[in-house]
Amino acid sequence: MVAMKNNGFTLLEIIIVLTLVTLVLGLSTVYFAGYLPSVKLDATGREMAALIRQARSQALLKMETQSVMIDLDDRSYGLGTEATKNIPASVLVTVLDPFYGELRQGKFPLVFHPVGGGEGRTIILSAGKKKIRIDLDPITGAVKSRYQ
């Protein structure tokens, strides 16, 4: 007698595989949805701190006043008088000014002088519960960024 051989999958096996694939995709979507704003915050914090350090270095090297413009209304920042880099919508920016306090609107130049000093402001970037604080020392112009 010749035995018959099954070469296909049963309906139950296909349903189990589809259920597992759907479960994995569903969980990964939830994971990445919470992760992307954090990545945008990190990238914006690194770029902004690097641009501020670049302005300070140029002021010292060229012996000329340099500035970084932060425009909270247009959600952008850049070297010089124009803000050319965009701030992602998921990132909230707050400027702490020693005279005016906490500011969330307007344009703010961060000025660096040839002798090394600069504006004594603090920039806080936040997305959800995560925050990055960029401190500018008013005497030396040093830029320090840290997570809060």
Image (cartoon, rainbow, N blue to C red):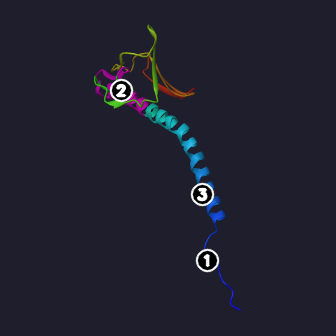
* Pointer 3 local density, CA inside 10 Å: few below 14, some 14–19, many at least 20: few
Q: Nearer the viewer, mark 2 or mark 1?
A: 1
- Nearest to the observer: residue 59 or residue 121: 121
As helix, strand or loop, the secondary structure at mark 2 comes to: strand
The residue sitting at 28% across, 25% down in the picture is: 82
Assign the C terminus to one quadrant of the image.
Answer: top right
As helix, strand or loop, the secondary structure at mark 3 comes to: helix
17 vs 147: above or below: below
Q: Quadrant of residue 84?
A: top left
Amino acid type for the residue under numbered disc 1: Asn
- Nearest to the observer: residue 13 or residue 101: 13
Q: Please give the residue where the numbered disc 1 appears in the rendered image.
A: 7
Identity of the residue furthest to the right in this view = 1
Q: Nearer the viewer, mark 3 or mark 2?
A: 3
Q: Quadrant of residue 50?
A: top left
Q: CA distance from mark 2 to mark 1?
A: 61 Å
Residue 111 at x, y percent in the picture: 35, 19
Give the label on residue 76, or none: 2
Q: Is residue 138 magenta?
A: no
The residue sitting at 42% across, 29% down in the picture is: 89
State which region is magenta: 47-73
Residue 148 placement, left or right of 111: right
Amino acid type for the residue under numbered disc 3: Leu
